[in-house]
Amino acid sequence: MNKQESNSNKIKPNESHAGITALQEEVHARFPELAKSEIHGNTLYLEANAASYQTICKDLNGQFAFPLVSMFASDDRARTGCFNIHTVFANRQSGILISVALPIDPSTCAFPSLCDLIPAAALYEREIHDLFGLRPMGHPNPKRLVFHGNWPKNQYPLRKEFPADQRPDFTDEKIEFTRIDGEGVYEIPVGPVHAGIIEPGHFRFSLAGEPILNLEAQLYFVHKGIEKLIEGKTIEHGFYLSERISGDETFTNSLTYCQAVEKIAGIQVPARASYTRVLFAELERVTSHLGDLAGICQDVAYGFASYQFKMLRGWSYRIADELCGMRFLRSVNTPGGIRRDFIHGKGKNLTRLLTELKKELTETEAIVMHNSLFIDRIENTGILKNKIAVDLNATGPGGRASGVDFDVRKAFPYEVYAALSFEVPVQSDGDVSSRMKVKLAECFQSISLMQQVLERIPQGIVKEEIGILKPYHSAYGLTEAPRGENIHYIMTGENNTILRYKVRTPSFCSWPALCHAVSGNIVPDFPLINKSFNLSYAGNDL
């Protein structure tokens, strides 16, 4: 049983409205020094001070067993005279987010680190320091995360005064990797350029003989500056950028963006649009998982299985082509619904294609998962322990394969998922085999969900106008991407523009988990373990 499941302070499911009020009262009773608290939808907004911040966060994560799901900064000096740190926790049993704001004095630009209390805070705090210049006091390893040795010191691009088109003079500072000393210990550097067409990432292995002692990943070679590019842009322009965060999660990212906008606008998406969104989201999930399954089989030279899964992925692209003519599923969503009725007149053919896909996948699974040589290769390889998965908030198939029974579609139901029937596959061994089993099972669940959509989708309009959004209002979008929990935060500016946009895709949480899963294995196992997670470089390197 993981930490979230074993705590007696959990609020019972299906009591969201009453639960968030009860939670607000309990938090106020425990922390009377809170500056303020407000409820907007399913989010409880709190404001702490430097003296109470660590204690509040510690209790939310420990006593209440709410995991840390996001952490970021905002430059609010023009309005409030300070920066703010936003630390976001989730009550996954009741579908409640708790966002704790900590005002930061610009004269000190420092805030107390949470690393010793909440391990998952480590990367967030390093990111905040790189992008805003706010120092996490007490952080055990505050080395650069986003920027490498060529980025000049004291240049913080997410501060409002930093121009988006500024190109600073690069420097040449060496960023040290973690060194492990000992007799017979040596290092193997891999990347950042790899064979094939994958994006760049540097991996530094420390080994004693063959077993891997430590793996440190250096990413952000393709950092795009999306959060800066979107500042001051219109809601429509922001949507365009959200679709281009990561190619294989285009639909999910645009959906999460739309969710946040629609919450701020206070509108309800038409039912036909909600059903359509579920169909596209599940199609993206199937396509992603089939690619992962093909990659796992390819990395152990199981040619037949790899070709089968690649073929089935091609079949899922046929469904995408039938729906919208775009395999990346771009230009389907729009704030307020979907751009047009993509399903009208296609139900019969889509049903046939899904039936064929399910039949072939069933036969492929029966062959592949009964191949003893293949099973021997993937069992007990790349084990991610449950405690590490919980501590780092590893979600999606990677977390569920390690016993973390959580899926946004169940815990924070959105669109019409609450009206549909599906199960969340969970394994407990945490190895490559478990991650493969979870993804296979999820493919069947996704096909079933798409079939249910085609059977139940009502007639009607597919879009509501969002109108004029109030400035300086904020909301969180939250979806289950193919790789797991996906969170987008938006604060509006004047004239339907965006003041602050923060994206936290599931890959950000899972890259550290991958490094733990590799420990104790040998270097030739790394491609297999890596593919079983199949994390996004682009989704991390925002």
Image: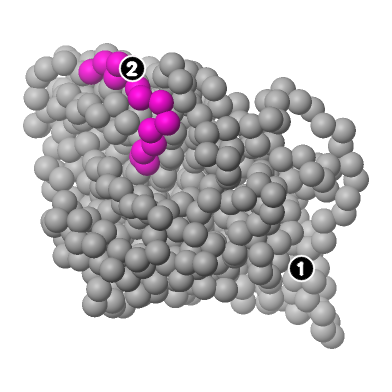
In the image, is residue 262 above or below residue 30?
above
The answer to whether 40 appears left or right of 537 in the picture is left
In terms of sequence position, does the residue under pointer 1 or pointer 2 come before the other?
1
Disc 2 target residue: 468
Disc 1 target residue: 178
Q: Identify residue type, mark 2.
A: Ile
From the top left corner, tell me how far across and down residue 452 is, in percent: 14, 37
Q: Is residue 454 visible?
A: yes
Q: Residue at (29%, 26%) from the top-left corner?
A: 265
Q: Identify residue type, mark 1.
A: Thr
Q: Are marks 1 and 2 in contact (CB under 8 Å)?
A: no
Towards the viewer: 241 or 475: 475
Alpha carbon separation for disc pair 1 and 2: 50 Å
Picture quarter with the N terminus: bottom left
From the top left corner, tell me how far across and down residue 141 is, in percent: 70, 66
Q: Residue at (58%, 40%) from the top-left corner?
A: 81
- Tag on residue 506? none
Q: Main secondary structure of the magenta part?
A: loop
SS for tag 1? loop
In the image, is residue 316 above or below residue 365?
above
The answer to whether 174 appears left or right of 119 in the picture is right
Towards the viewer: 257 or 301: 257
From the top left corner, tell me how far across and down residue 301 is, in percent: 56, 55
Q: Quadrant of residue 253?
A: top left
Query: What segment carries the magenta color?
Result: 464-477
Q: Residue at (9%, 32%) from the top-left corner?
A: 456
From the top left corner, tell me how far across and down residue 122 is, in percent: 59, 62
Is residue 470 highlighted in magenta? Answer: yes
Q: Residue at (82%, 32%) from the top-left corner?
A: 168
